[in-house]
Amino acid sequence: MSTTEPTTSAEREDRVLERIDKFRQRRPRLLDEVVTLAHGAGGKSSAALVDAVFVEAFRNEELEQLGDAAALTMPSGERLAFSTDSYVVQPLRFPGGSIGHLAVHGTVNDLAVSGARPRWLSAAFVIEEGFPIAELREIVADMSEAAVLSGVQIVTGDTKVVGKGAADGVYISTAGVGVIPEGRRLSADLVRAGDKVLLSGTIGAHGMAVMLARGDLAIEADIASDTAPVNSLVETLLDAAPSTRWMRDATRGGVGTVCNELAHACQLAVIVDEQSLPIEPQVLGACDMLGIDPLYVANEGKFVAIVAADEADAAVAAMRSHPRGADATVVGEILAEPPGIVALRTSFGGSRIVDMLVGDPLPRIC
């Protein structure tokens, strides 16, 4: 036997984890010659596309942070967060919301989890020729309602019309600006071993609601999207846990992908307890029937937060006192080893690695 060959189960496990870590640290490689739906799923393919095409072309310090919003310092010293997003969901209306609600909530939430207080939004519409004006009015009314609920104003915008068949009804892009309070900073480099992983509520409802609303599956379930603004809930959390390290809203790619992004950024281990994950029974049932892991299903009104261990109980209690945080809970912890890995402690007493999302099980859900 070679002297370099591992001889114990612990040594063999360490060797496997070392190989996995080396593989995961590789820079994403874009091997595709055309864009596929997987490139919009928020997982490995998305990361490769963004890194090889957009970051490579536009490279700058703010962009390379790859956060939900860019944190910008004005000449006056005031700090702003700036975010943008596009919405191509199909169908345009689904249980619990519409593309109009998503277009506001999505950008508001990206600003909020970046530590900002959202203030202003822009809205741009690409409308297909023949789209009913009455339906457009309803979508715009949904956006107005969502803006009022979120405490933001839509202050500028643009409209384009394309020929019939050149779009799928209507696409909406929103950009948002928020003010970051003095002294507030959220970053992966603040995360430490021993910190707790919090979820603001149940997961998977949005992706499943949209999927079932398409009517392509012979599944009936009472599932509504969780689309909602989280900015007031974020403020409640930060008041109770001022040492909060990092936050991210778990949209495309779900909680599993968000945790992988964090583990890669901070080079610590994110350990999630399967039994602690808050999942509504009907959502879990639909995921089981479709063979989809709820950890990868998109949410539009939930976020992951990393808080100091001594503030975790206060954070959960404060969030549960908020109307949108009733199901908030601690779902895991940050460990020093193995670095850069996300692992799930299963209900059977074992564990498994949760990798970055591959492919796109639920296209066009936002």
Image (spheres, rainbow, N blue to C red):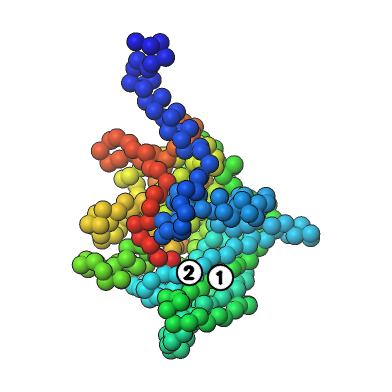
For the C terminus, give its image quadrant. Answer: bottom left
Disc 1 versus disc 2: distance between alpha carbons? 8 Å
Q: Quadrant of the N terminus?
A: top left
Q: Secondary structure at mark 2?
A: strand
**Looking at the image, which residue is at 72% across and 57% down?**
73
The residue to which callout 1 is attached is 174
Expressed as whole percent of the image width and height from the top left, the position of residue 344 reads: 36, 41
**Circles 1, 2 touching at the beta carbon (< 8 Å):** yes
In the structure shown, which secondary structural element does the residue marked by tag 1 occupy? strand
Q: Can the viewer see residue 31 in this picture?
A: yes
Q: Residue at x 34, y 67 (%)?
A: 210
Find residue 320 and report its horizontal and vertical position in percent: 43, 57
Near mark 1 (Cα within 10 A), the count class, few <14, some 14-19 or many ≥20, is many
Relative placement, left or right, of 313 versus 53 is left
* Front one among 343 and 66: 66
Q: Position of residue 349 (x, y in %)?
A: 28, 35
Residue 87 shows which numbered tag? 2
* Dot 1 or dot 2, earlier in sequence: 2
Residue 134 tag number: none
Q: Residue at x 50, y 65 (%)?
A: 106
